[in-house]
Image (spheres, helix red, strand yellow):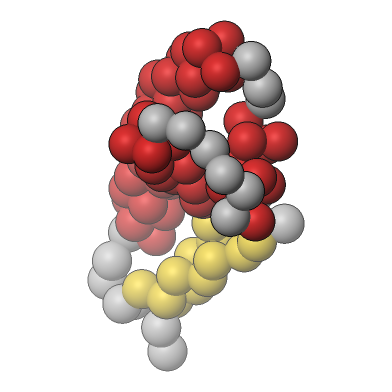
Amino acid sequence: MNQIVLETRADAPRVAVSDAVTRAIAERVGNLDATLRLLELSLREHELKHGMFSAAFYQKYQNGDELPDINDFQVWAGEYELSKKLGAERDLLTGTIIRTREES
């Protein structure tokens, strides 16, 4: 679990700051979820079209194995990489606790 400690001015409402950060994180997670759903649909289309799972394809792509239709595979690889990156960001954000502390 990740923890973020926000230090606020003594006159700043700690709850308001914490709520604002929590809402921003929740909004980002919602955006990530929506994007990941779209990427998942696209990855499934590639898998059905080419008859292999994305992870297996990506391993071949990274190894430099000969694959036809270069443009389509570049798109597939890019979408796969993006899905992994955004999934990791989502996992990081959903495991974050927000705490506030007044500045002395």
In this view of the protein, which residue sits in the foreground, 102 or 50? 50
Q: Is residue 9 above or below residue 16?
A: below
Quadrant for residue 66, please give it: top right
**Front in this rendered view, residue 91 or 42:** 42
Residue extending farthest left: 11
Locate residue 81, reporting x and y percent: 49, 47
Q: Residue at x 64, y 15 (%)?
A: 51
Q: Does residue 1 appear anywhere in the picture?
A: yes
Residue nearest the observer in this picture, 49 or 88: 49
* 65 relative to 19 in the view: left or right: right
Q: Is residue 90 visible?
A: no
Q: Is residue 45 above or below residue 55?
A: above
Q: How many discs mark residues in the rendered view?
A: 0
Lateral position of residue 78 relative to residue 61, left or right = left
Please name the residue shown 36% across and 73% down the image.
8
Residue 74's x, y, as percent? 39, 42
Q: Residue at x 57, y 10 (%)?
A: 48
Quadrant where the N terminus is found in the figure: bottom right
Quadrant, the C terminus: bottom left
Q: At 39% across and 60% down in the image, what residue appears?
A: 14
Q: Residue 22's spot in the image, x, y percent?
A: 43, 45
Q: Position of residue 15 (x, y in %)?
A: 41, 51
| Image-quadrant location for residue 79 | top left
